[in-house]
Image (cartoon, grey):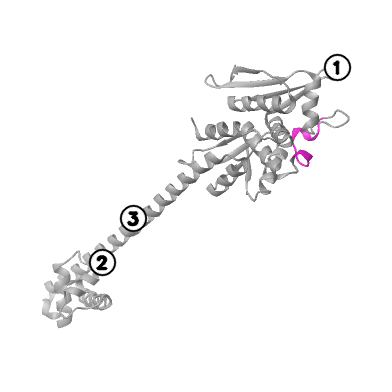
Amino acid sequence: MSFSQEVKEELATHISSAMHCKIAETAAILSMCGSVAIDENGKYSVRFRTETKVTADKLKQLLWKTFRIETEIVSRNNAYSKSQKTYTITIKEHDEALKVLQATKLINSYGDIEENLSITNNVIIMKDCCKRAFIRGAFMAAGSINDPQKSYHFEIKCSSNKKSEQIINLLKNFNIEAKTVARKGHFVVYIKEGEGIINVLNVMEAHVALMKMENIRILKDMSNYYNRQVNCETANIKKTVSTSIRQIDDINMIIEKKGLSYLPEKLQDIATVRVENPDASLQELGEMLDPPLGKSGVNHRLRKICRIADELRD
């Protein structure tokens, strides 16, 4: 099971006890994957279509617990993919469809569909708890989230720019920054930062998924930290080895051209110690001298030897 499916399975078990929150979540699913039809007699019907079985199951529960409307889930093979199915719930009875549309404030007193099913200033999402429920429903209907082991990516696919702005504004109420991008005729609201996705999971009240993602984030951060430490150590070792090789080359060149006695006595000692101990650090070289010499002193003498070697080369 994918991480996205795990989140939806968890959210499917979350049925709010408050009637207004159940209505808000139903409104979100209707807005994201629903449609309204009016026949020649002016009778309404409402249809929900989703590719996620768990979303259809939750909507069925919401319709029963909120409106006492009994519905049936009809599954069909997806026309574009043999491995996927489409799940449809239809409220055929005019009175029942009208009941849902009126409760979600998507129909006005004149019988006109409001806001093209995009809910912006709707009274059903005035409370913070209802905003949470709406975001939860929108994700159930049209959202997905990547496996955090691989990458951080959360998105909700909207059919219009107005609906994407609606989602972004709802997320801003919880100090969550999201962006939108046009993709294949849709407007996709997305978040790519781990912290933002954690906050969305908290808003939707997917606490089990939140803890799982937090654990993965901690392990990834620790792994990245230790990788940086190892890379830093490796770089330092390479630098030390490269410097040691250059110093030894300079000393050997001086010995070949002029002999070790060409160097001042203090430099002869450090030159001998460096050639005999190519892997030693500056501190270790200093401890081998008599009397011992500090790291900066060793470095100063080796730099003098390098300058003498450069002069001989010139």
| Left or right of 228 on screen, residue 173 | right
For residue 211, above or below residue 256: above
Task: Tell me residue 86's x, y (percent).
Answer: 61, 21
> Label 3: which residue?
230
**Labels 1, 2: front one:** 1
Looking at the rendered structure, the kind of residue marked 3 is Val
Cβ atoms at labels 1 and 2 below 8 Å apart: no
Circle number at residue 13: none
Give the crowd class for mark 1: few <14, some 14-19, many >=20 residues within 10 Å: few
Q: Is residue 152 visible?
A: no
What crowding class fits label 2: few (fewer than 14 Cα within 10 Å), some (14-19), or many (20 or more)? few
Identity of the amino acid at label 2?
Answer: Thr
Sequence order check, earlier mark of 3 and 1: 1
Image: magenta residue range: 113-124
Calculate the distance from the C-alpha at mark 3 to the C-alpha at mark 1: 74 Å
Q: Which residue is mark 1?
A: 41
State the SS at label 2. helix
Q: Quick check: 221 above or below 140?
A: below
Q: Nearer the viewer, residue 204 or 183?
A: 204
Residue under pointer 2: 243
Q: Earlier in the sequence, mark 1 or mark 2?
A: 1
